[in-house]
Image (tube, rainbow, N blue to C red):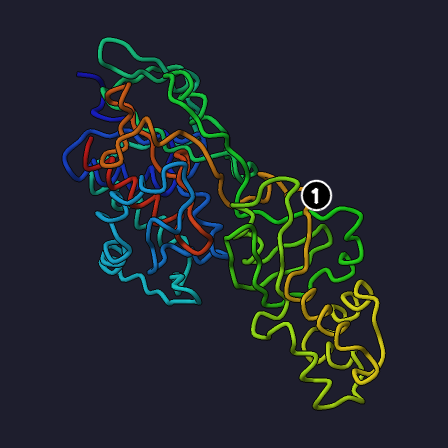
Amino acid sequence: MGDYDAIILGAGAAGMMCAATAGQRGRRVLLTDHADAPGKKILISGGGRCNFTNIHTAADRYLSANPHFAKSALGRYTPQDFLTLIGRYGITWHEKTLGQLFCDGSAKQIVAMLAEECAAGGVTMALGQPVTDVSHGDGLFRIKLGDRTVSAPSLVLATGGPSIPKLGATGFAYEVARQFDLKLVQPRPALVPFTLGPDDALFQSLSGVSAEVEVRWNKTRFREAALFTHRGLSGPAMLQISSYWEHRTPIHVNFLPDLGVDWLLDEKRNRPRTGLRRVLVERFPERMADALLERIGAKGDLGNLPDKTLRQIGERLAGWSFIPSGTEGYAKAEVTVGGIATAGLSSRTMEAAKVPGLYAIGEAVDVTGWLGGYNFQWAWASGWAAGQAL
């Protein structure tokens, strides 16, 4: 029989949702975490207000080797389902841009709600106790917690990926997956700032300056704010494109996404005696205009500059090329791209095909959402799907 019906490793968003769902279905659930409190990543999310879902959730907002995998879980547990849940707890919320929903109060409300939901399901929590061994035999999974061993016919991997190690994040889920011969898609940092090399050192002087841009990598585009940092490029637009970017390839930034490439020709016709610098300062923060001009290498009144030169400047501002030297890595990455391969999992239950009773959910799986609440919705949906199957 085992000591429990299910053991869930990881008391984050997906793990707590799974535990609460299974517990309220009458299952005896043990929820473990090496951290001394649940939901640590939830607490820091959204600047402490938890961007808990996105109303535009759809499978095409997720990266995965199988772009269809997330459809089943996302279709069966929707943003509206989560809103219904928080509504029962009186948690008020607001929409920011692009469908992002945040708590009016604090992310602590979401953690407290999930803990309450777990309590309602009679879930046993074992916090501050690292799992030192995982084994399987006679139809039972056994884990070693400190000096005791507990067992259950089902084991759920919900320990996330290695992003934000200062919160205790590790690649533990991958180690257990390898132990049971589950394939992995190479993990890498995602939703992470870029670093720029010495060729772009000029832009370090712009640290703290932001602007709305359209950033493109291959055919993928995002239009949001970009932020220059002392190390490179950040802000929502850059975090979004970082999930797609491949090393040593360029990203292209349109600094004026609302204007055509010939806009300077129009300006020249309308006010030929106006200086190029002045026109750019009207469109950009002054420091940014000066840095761009230094790179462009043109100056003078518009009327004295050839049309060809003005068109080239317009084209350059519409497709400025950066080749990042890298990213700031897992330390600054909000999530991880890659992880436990979906090919070995049921899209309906999250159970491993080769290892009955073994499940993987949340960030540990090769499903990664865009910035803006999508990864939380995947945590709720995948956790709910597994919790329904346990």
Residue 177 image offset from top left, x and y in percent: 39, 22
Q: In percent of the image, x 57 and y 47: which residue is there?
A: 192
Residue furthest left as drawn:
26
Lateral position of residue 224 relative to residue 156, left or right: right
Q: Residue 317, image x and y in percent? A: 68, 66
- Does 160 sit above or below residue 281? above
| For residue 136, side relative to residue 245 (left or right) | left
**Label 1 crowding class (10 Å Cα cut-off): few <14, some 14-19, many 20+?**
some
Does 300 appear above or below 125?
Answer: below
Q: Is residue 126 visible?
A: no
Q: Quadrant of residue 37?
A: top left
* Residue occupied by mark 1: 325
Q: Nearer the viewer, residue 296 or 226?
A: 296
Q: Secondary structure at mark 1?
A: loop
**Residue 281 can be seen, yes or no:** yes
Circle count:
1
Residue 333 lies, in percent from the top left, at: 55, 44
Q: Identity of the amino acid at label 1? A: Ser
Question: 17 above or below 389?
Answer: below
Location of the N terminus by quadrant is top left
254 or 339: nearer the viewer: 254
Residue 144: where, in percent of width, then height? Answer: 38, 16
Between 102 and 60, the one lying in front of the other is 60
Which corner quadrant of the image does residue 275 belong to? bottom right
Of the 4 image quadrants, the one containing the C terminus is top left
